[in-house]
Amino acid sequence: MTQLKDLYEVADRDGIEVLKIDCPKCGSISLMTDDKQCYIGIDSNAFESNAEEVVRLAHELGHCERGAFYNIHSSFDIREKHEYRADKWAIQQLMPYDEIIQACKSGYVECWQLADYFGVTEDFVHRAFSIYQNMGCSFR
């Protein structure tokens, strides 16, 4: 699933409202209300490529799908834990492990090749390998 359309369908299916916003500094944001309704704000003009928007929307959906929200006022809540959970969800959607293995067997072995193949950024490919390795997956 690498198309923006597919990600918007996930949001629609799961009742997550995606709003077009003007947010040039951060590009996107997600929040959950007290009644557990999730909203995503995304500024399509803040991204230099379609791949950047795909990665960012998938990450924000990951926050919503996994309930990975942190309270900036709590000293007990670890922001990185929630960012990791959002990234993990996005990576499993956009770059499933078995599809990475197939792509590599087909000759896509450089990060830039995998990024082009999956329609994501090179940074996202690096994060995918790191997260899959943390999960005990092997790429040898």
Image (cartoon, rainbow, N blue to C red):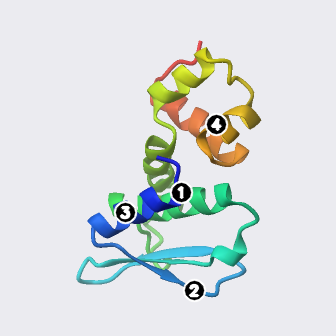
Gap between marks 4 and 1 measured at Cα: 28 Å
Q: Earlier in the sequence, mark 4 or mark 1?
A: 1
Q: Earlier in the sequence, mark 2 or mark 4?
A: 2
Q: Nearer the viewer, mark 4 or mark 1?
A: 4
Q: Residues within 10 Å of mark 4 (few under 14, many from 20)?
A: some
Tell me if residue 59 can be seen: no
Q: Earlier in the sequence, mark 2 or mark 1?
A: 2
Relative placement, left or right, of 108 versus 37 is right
Which label belongs to residue 21? 2
Q: Position of residue 89 (x, y in %)?
A: 43, 49
Gap between marks 2 and 3 measured at Cα: 19 Å
Q: Residue at x 26, y 77 (%)?
A: 36
Q: Residues within 10 Å of mark 1 (few under 14, many from 20)?
A: few
Q: Earlier in the sequence, mark 1 or mark 3?
A: 3
Q: Secondary structure at mark 4?
A: helix
Q: Amino acid at mark 1?
A: Glu
Q: Amino acid at mark 2?
A: Ile
Q: Position of residue 44 (x, y in %)?
A: 64, 74
Q: Secondary structure at mark 1?
A: helix
Q: Earlier in the sequence, mark 3 or mark 4?
A: 3
Q: Earlier in the sequence, mark 2 or mark 3?
A: 3
Q: Which residue is mark 3?
A: 9
Q: Residue at x 47, y 61 (%)?
A: 5
Q: Residues within 10 Å of mark 3 (few under 14, many from 20)?
A: few
CB under 8 Å between discs 3 and 4: no
Relative placement, left or right, of 78 versus 56 is left
Relative placement, left or right, of 69 versus 51 is left
Q: Secondary structure at mark 2?
A: loop
Q: Which residue is mark 1?
A: 80
* Residue toward you, 92 or 5: 5
Q: Which residue is mark 4?
A: 117
**In this rendering, is residue 84 above or below 79?**
above
